[in-house]
C-alpha cells in the first residue's frame, strides 16, 4: 500500500509539473522577452526611464547591496504608466477612436487616463467607492469620466462593460491580466538588467501580478531571479506551494473579495488567471510576505534614508528586503546584489503622517 501511495503521489507531481510547463508555454506565446523588448521601444519616447536610488544605511540593514528602482517617479506616480501606455499605443486607429475603459483602485486608472489623453482617445475610468482621495484626484487630472462602483471584482467588471458599451465599443484595458499591460510592466526588468551589473535578484510587489509576471518574463533565461512580495493575507506563498491559483473557498472570497492591507493599491486576492498566474508560477523563484507594520516601517525608511515619499505599496519590496525571511533566503542563495521596485508614490498624506510618526 505504501508503494502504491508513493506511485500515486509521484504521478500527481508529474501531472502538476506538466500542467505548469504547459500553462507557462501558452502564456509565453502572448508575453515573451522579445515582446517586452518591443514594448520598451514603443514606450521609450513617452515614459520615463526611472533612476536607481542607493543608500549605505539600507545596504547595512539588508546586509547586501540594494538598488531601488524609483517607479514612484514615473509619469502619473507609479509603474502602471508603462503597461497602460503600451496598451493604448498598441490600439489601431479605429480602436482608439472608440475609446478605452479601465477599472482600477487608482494607479492603473490614472495611467490609462494619461495615456488616452496623450493619444486623444475617449476614456472612462471605473473605481471602487473605497478609492483614496489622493488617487481619485490623480485620475481627475487626466479624465473627467469617472464611475464609482462597489469594491468587488464582479462589480468592477460589470461597470467597465457598461462604460465600454456607453462609449460605443471601447476597449477595456485590464489592470494586470492583459498581455500588452504585462509587456509594458516588464520593461522595468529590462532596465534593471541593463543598469545593474551582476544583478542576483529583483524583489517585486505583487497584487494582480502584472508587474511581477512582466519582470519575470524579462528576466527569463538570465541569471537574475525574481521574488514576489505579498501583503499578509494574500497567501500567494501557499498558492505556489499547492500549485493552485485559488486556495480560497467561494464563501471566503464572497465574504472578503478584497484584501485588507495598509497597501491600498494592492487589494487583489488572486493573480490574473489567463496570463499573470501561469507566468508567475512558472518563472518566479520565491514568495515573501510582509505585514502592515513592516510596510509602514519601510515607508518611514524610504523617507529618512532616501528622502523619498512613497505610498505603502511602494514600500512593500523594501519591507521584504529588511526582513529576516529575506535574510535567510539571501544567505541560502548567496545573493549580494539585489534590486527592488518602489512601485508607487501616490500616497495619502494621512497614511504618510502615520508612517513617519512611527
Image: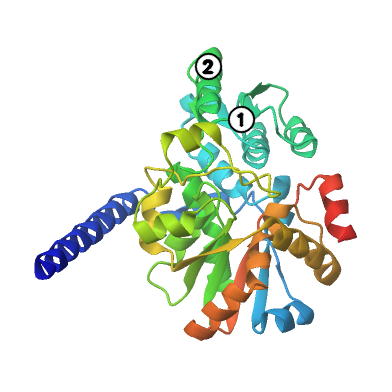
Would you say 160 lies left or right of 134 here? left
Residue drawn where x is 45% and y is 41% of the image:
178
Q: Nearer the viewer, residue 264 or 291?
A: 291
Residue on which the image places disc 1: 151
Q: Which of 323 and 66 is in front in this view?
A: 323
- Residue 103 in the image, given as x and y percentages of width and height: 58, 31
Would you say 118 lies left or right of 86 here? right
Numbered circle sitting on residue 127 = none
Dot 1 alpha-carbon crowd within 10 angstroms: few under 14, some 14 to 19, many 20 or more: some
Give the spatial CA distance, label 2 vs label 1.
16 Å
* Residue 156 sits above or below residue 358 on the image: above
Would you say 113 lies left or right of 168 here? right
- Dot in front, 2 or 1: 1
- Residue 147 in the image, given as x and y percentages of width and height: 66, 21
Residue on which the image places disc 2: 162
Q: Identify the secondary structure beneath mark 2.
A: helix
Dot 2 alpha-carbon crowd within 10 angstroms: few under 14, some 14 to 19, many 20 or more: some
Would you say 70 lies left or right of 275 here? right
Amino acid at each position: 500500500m505504501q508503494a502504491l501511495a508513493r506511485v500515486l503521489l509521484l504521478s500527481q507531481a508529474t501531472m502538476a509539473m506538466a500542467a505548469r510547463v504547459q500553462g507557462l508555454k501558452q502564456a509565453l506565446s502572448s508575453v515573451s522577452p522579445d515582446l517586452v523588448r518591443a514594448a520598451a521601444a514603443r514606450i521609450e519616447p513617452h515614459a520615463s526611464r526611472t533612476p536607481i536610488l542607493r543608500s549605505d544605511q539600507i545596504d547595512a540593514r539588508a546586509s547586501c547591496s540594494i538598488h531601488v528602482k524609483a517607479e514612484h517617479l514615473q509619469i502619473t506616480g507609479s509603474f502602471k504608466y508603462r503597461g497602460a501606455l503600451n496598451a493604448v499605443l498598441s490600439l489601431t486607429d479605429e480602436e482608439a477612436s472608440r475609446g478605452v475603459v479601465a477599472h482600477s483602485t487608482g494607479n492603473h486608472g490614472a495611467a490609462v487616463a494619461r495615456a488616452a489623453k496623450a493619444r486623444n482617445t475617449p476614456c472612462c475610468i471605473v473605481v471602487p467607492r473605497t478609492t483614496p482621495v489622493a488617487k481619485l484626484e490623480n485620475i481627475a487630472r487626466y479624465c473627467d469620466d469617472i464611475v464609482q462602483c462597489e469594491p468587488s471584482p464582479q462589480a468592477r467588471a460589470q461597470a467597465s462593460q457598461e462604460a465600454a458599451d456607453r462609449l460605443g465599443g471601447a476597449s477595456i484595458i485590464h489592470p494586470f491580466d492583459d498581455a500588452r499591460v504585462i509587456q509594458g510592466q516588464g520593461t522595468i526588468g529590462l532596465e534593471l538588467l541593463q543598469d545593474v551589473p551582476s544583478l542576483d535578484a529583483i524583489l517585486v510587489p505583487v497584487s494582480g501580478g502584472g508587474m511581477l509576471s512582466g519582470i519575470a518574463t524579462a528576466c527569463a533565461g538570465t541569471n537574475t531571479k525574481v521574488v514576489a512580495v505579498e501583503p499578509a493575507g494574500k497567501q500567494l506563498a501557499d498558492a505556489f506551494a499547492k500549485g493552485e491559483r485559488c486556495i480560497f473557498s467561494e464563501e471566503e472570497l464572497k465574504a472578503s473579495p478584497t484584501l485588507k492591507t495598509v497597501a491600498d493599491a494592492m487589494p487583489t486576492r488572486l493573480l490574473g488567471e489567463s496570463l499573470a498566474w501561469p507566468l508567475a508560477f512558472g518563472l518566479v523563484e520565491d514568495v515573501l510576505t510582509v505585514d502592515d507594520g513592516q510596510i509602514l516601517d519601510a515607508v518611514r525608511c524610504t523617507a529618512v534614508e532616501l528622502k523619498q515619499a512613497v505610498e505603502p505599496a511602494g514600500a512593500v519590496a523594501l519591507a521584504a528586503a529588511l526582513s529576516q525571511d529575506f535574510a535567510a533566503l539571501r544567505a541560502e542563495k548567496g545573493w549580494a546584489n539585489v534590486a527592488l521596485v518602489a512601485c508607487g508614490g501616490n500616497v495619502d498624506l494621512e497614511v504618510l503622517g502615520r508612517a513617519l510618526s512611527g
